[in-house]
Amino acid sequence: MVKYLNKGIDETRKEEVKTEPLLKKAKYVMLKKSENLTDKQRARFMEINQANLLTSRAWKMRENFMEIFEKQTTEEASVFFESWYENVVKSNIAPMKKAAKTLKNYKQGIINIIKYDLNNARAERFNGAIQKLNRVAQGYRNYDNLRIAILFFNGKLNLFSHY
């Protein structure tokens, strides 16, 4: 979701940088989360934000969208999404409209995230462990050797005797 919204912000910035020199070398300032900005980046961001450029409005649309994850029920999230979608579609920022239309196709999945409170952290952690095995071994000769290593190191085996 954030990928699509960030792409919309960046495309808006690319279009607007042609007429607004303030946006030169500001790509990462606009794509970072506000809490991760350095002091220098924060000052630059505030300058861009106060200029009320299309890019800063696109950034606000992304930040507004992120509020959906604070909703407690699927009904609240659905109403919020529709309201957010209508505001973005009424705007004159074409890349953000495109991102909003893409997210509209995934609306049910977004609502399900709130309903079931699921994420892919466990799968990412396991994938990271497999990648670490690959790095340490500098590759495996064949798939069977990789499979054995995965099962051995991640199988939670108790190798101590039970006497």
Image: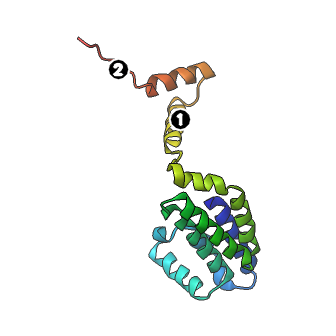
Quarter that holds the C terminus:
top left
Residue 80 visible in the displayed image: yes
Amino acid type of disc 1?
Arg
Q: Is residue 156 above or below residue 69?
A: above
| Residue to which mark 2 is pinned | 158
- At x 48%, y 60%, the residue is 72
Residue 161, located in which quarter of the rendered image? top left
Report the side of 63 relative to 5 (left or right).
Answer: left
| Residue to which mark 1 is pinned | 135
Closest to the observer, 1 or 150? 1
Q: How is the image coloured?
A: rainbow
Q: Residue furthest left?
A: 163
Q: In x, y percent, where is residue 135?
A: 53, 35
**Gap between marks 2 and 1, in whole Å?**
25 Å
- At x 72%, y 57%, the residue is 105
Q: In x, y percent, where is residue 144?
A: 59, 19
Q: Is residue 128 above or below residue 8?
A: above
Closest to the observer, 111 or 27? 111
Q: Residue furthest bottom?
A: 51
Closest to the observer, 129 or 3? 3
Number of numbered markers: 2
SS for tag 1?
A: helix
Q: Sort mark 1 into few (<14), some (14-19) or many (20+) by Cα contacts within 10 Å.
A: few
Amino acid type of disc 2?
Asn
